Image (cartoon, rainbow, N blue to C red):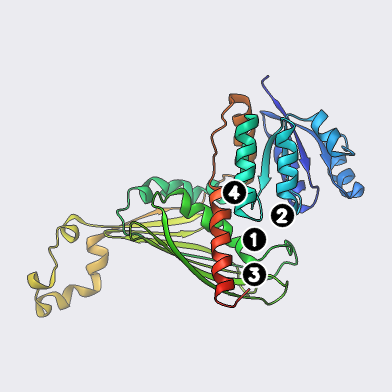
Amino acid sequence: MDRVKIAVVGAGRLGGFHADKIAACEKSILAGVYDTDPEAARRTAEKHGVPVLESLEAVVSAADGVTVAAPTDQHFELGEYFLRRGKHVLLEKPMAVTGSQARALRAAARAERRVLHTGHTERFNPAWQAVVPLIREMTPPVIIEARRVSPYTFRCTDVGATLDIMIHDLELVLSVTDSPIRSVSAVSFEEFTGCEDACAAQVHFEDGSLARFFASRAEQTPQRLMNIYSRGKRVFLDFALRRAEVVTAGPDILAGAYAPEKTVYAEMQPKIAGFMKEHYKTKLFEKSPVDPLQEEENLFAEAILRGDLAPRDHGAEAVELAGRILTACRKNGTK
């Protein structure tokens, strides 16, 4: 088999994008489209000249793998349904609503020896890809600040901001952090949906590292930023611009050449204005033409063809951490 047949379940806005990428992938064939809304399925299917699949059983018969882009509260049920019937599954993020559901999906994938991926497209953001090796080299304790905010879109109203948008940053941080989590604290508030529309969380790790997350879908201006700090190195990421800046201290800084006992203010004062630029090196990683959603579907098809069953993301761990954050919000009397 040199191409894999993949069906799309959920033909809304995001499902339509997935169908486009599957059809464009050299290693996959769009096998068909299923949606509980027949008209939505028809529009996407006709665009690509593929059949409308009229039931979940028809999806099982038609495809080797399934991309699930249905509402979040259906991810677990649909993911488990297809895995237990021998199908490989790509679930849009978040992979489930609770940690227990995420663990059950992983267990089903292992038991059936099927590929299970989660749609965390920020992993494929070229700025992130460029700096991951540098982040892994940073010496603990590391301080991380992530901010992901947007105006309200009237989509994904079945879950709050934590599982809707913060989940991206949780997955990214967990992918570069080997240390266990020591403690979690969080607060949130509701503005639109009955779920939390803004959430601030703080996560302490056993190695002393600290990650702060803020997510809101009640802001005027969208931002997708992450700053990472450790001794001698700083990483600044703008995911929207696909831009990263890495600032590294010179060897004299790391050697302690400018410790208080080795400097005199009167001598240093004339040098202060240019001191940071002179003693810290900055490297920029700019935009690239990478299409993260296309990369995601390409990787899914390639994993199926290679029989690569290893998890390619930290989607389950991110859901677990999101659950701890939401529990902390409830303990604080917030949503």
Name the residue carrying label 3: 217
Q: CA distance from mark 2 to mark 4?
A: 16 Å
Name the residue carrying label 1: 164
Inspect the image, locate mark 4, and give the three-letter code of the amino acid beneath it: Thr
* Tag 4–tag 3 contact (CB < 8 Å): no
Q: Is residue 62 above or below residue 283?
A: above
**Image quadrant of residue 33?**
top right
Name the residue carrying label 4: 121
Drawn side of residue 24 relative to residue 320, left or right: right
Q: Secondary structure at mark 1?
A: helix
Instruction: Give the residue at the far top of this rendering.
Output: 1
Name the residue located 46 percent from the left edge and 59 percent from the top edge: 237
Counting residues from the start of the chain, the first of labels 3 and 1 encountered is: 1
The mark lying in front, picked from 3 and 1, is 1
Name the residue carrying label 2: 72
Mark 3 neighbour class, 10 Å CA radius: few under 14, some 14 to 19, many 20 or more? many
Query: Residue 185 at what x, y percent from top left?
Result: 48, 69
Counting residues from the start of the chain, the first of labels 1 and 2 encountered is: 2
Mark 2 neighbour class, 10 Å CA radius: few under 14, some 14 to 19, many 20 or more? many
Q: Is residue 280 above or below residue 288?
A: below
Inspect the image, locate mark 3, and give the three-letter code of the amino acid beneath it: Arg
Counting residues from the start of the chain, the first of labels 2 and 4 encountered is: 2
